[in-house]
Amino acid sequence: MDSVISPEAVLRLRELFGDRLSEAVTMAPYTSARIGGLADFLLEVRSAEDLAEVTRQLWDEEVPFRILGGGSNILVSDRGVREVVVLNRARKIHFFQEDEARYVKAESGAVLGTIARLAGDRGWSGLEWGATVPGTVGGAVVGNAGAFAGDMASVLKMAEILQQDGCVEEWPLERLEYGYRDSVLKRNPGSVVLSTTLELSASTVDACKTKMSEYSQKRAQSQPSGASIGSMFKNPPDDFAGRLIEAVGLKGFKQGAVSISSEHANFFMNEGEGTADQVWTLIQTAREKIMEKFGVSLELEIELIGEWLENEAALPKHGKGSS
Ligand SMILES: Cc1cc2nc3c(=O)[nH]c(=O)nc-3n(C[C@H](O)[C@H](O)[C@H](O)COP(=O)(O)OP(=O)(O)OC[C@H]3O[C@@H](n4cnc5c(N)ncnc54)[C@H](O)[C@@H]3O)c2cc1C
């Protein structure tokens, strides 16, 4: 459960941030699932410097906060969020060359798909897979996002990380300790990704665009479109969460306005006015049935954000898997 911000700290926040501080903000529009209750406080940042400054101020005031990128890997509770939500809209993107090497430096709130398409427009290859992955490059750095055999680990040169002591460090790839959809930042939350530099390779505009459109087509054929959080569960070793969900007869199963996709059972779709509690019931149903029939404990791929009940927040989130 979130820690509640004291009345004194609330006054201090209002004093520090003035009109910039939004209060009682519905989170649903900031998430790909279009689900989530009220955040007590929201601050929007528009540059990496601003992100660093706001973060340092919140640390100084000892106010808990949560960085929000594209909201495409999180389920926000219907009961809302008590931490300050820092909405990352730091989106500067800069392409440059050093000798033969090609780099793109992007602020962490830049949309991964935009960076991929701009790289493609230059005929710079390596990030075509990113055109199909929702969210910001900051979220992608944290979770080692990937698709079609590419991932952040295969392109990242360096990430600028703001640490809890207020210092900014340039972390090379090795320091992120990347694993499958996993990193040291994900295992130990608290640091903030300010920007990242990716190394790409020379190709042609045609080749990049062909690859991106192939990937988009493949995705359109294999995954449902509409409001969702992407893959709900990690794939257990040597199996697929979607296959298991289908095998226990839950494909197409509904709870209120949320359904388990009949195209890809690891996608839970919000068909309109879906709620986090409805998603949660489906998560529980799938986990219980799969445990009963196959003895497999599915772990969440997504993160639960906001005020959840103790037993909900305790669901295992980190573990091995593949998709
Ligand atoms: C339809 C769909 C398809 C998807 N397909 C894929 C796929 O193929 N491959 C894949 O890997 N993922 C996929 N995802 C999941 C999602 O796109 C990725 O996890 C993405 O990288 C999340 O980025 P985000 O900006 O939305 O992060 P958010 O959901 O906003 O945040 C995720 C976590 O990262 C933290 N965070 C975000 N930015 C920062 C920052 N700057 N500093 C520190 N912490 C930060 C947040 O606090 C949170 O804990 C899919 C999602 C959807 C909805």
Image (cartoon, grey):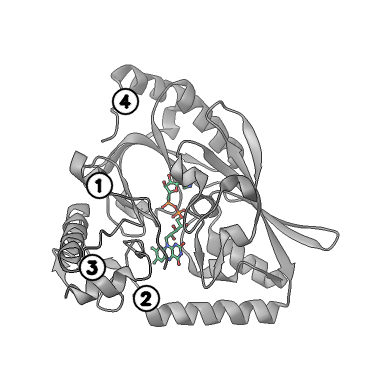
Indicate if the residue with disc 2 has its beta carbon within 8 Å of ligand 1: yes
Q: As shown in the figure, which amino acid type bears the numbered disc 3?
A: Glu
Q: Whole-percent x and y of residue 174?
A: 63, 49
Q: Is residue 68 rendered to the left or right of residue 153? A: left
Q: Whole-percent x and y of residue 99?
A: 86, 59
- Residue receiving disc 2: 223
- Residue receiving disc 4: 5
Q: CA distance from mark 1 to mark 4?
A: 18 Å
Q: Is residue 274 visible?
A: no
Which mark's residue is nearer the viewer, 2 or 3?
2
Q: Upstream in the sequence, badge 1 or badge 2?
A: 1
Q: Upstream in the sequence, badge 4 or badge 3?
A: 4
Q: Quadrant of residue 220?
A: bottom left
Q: Upstream in the sequence, badge 3 or badge 1?
A: 1
- Residue receiving disc 3: 271
| Tag of residue 218 | none
Q: Is residue 171 visible?
A: yes
Q: As shown in the figure, which amino acid type bears the numbered disc 1?
A: Ser
Q: Upstream in the sequence, badge 2 or badge 3?
A: 2
Q: Is residue 184 rendered to the left or right of residue 285? A: right
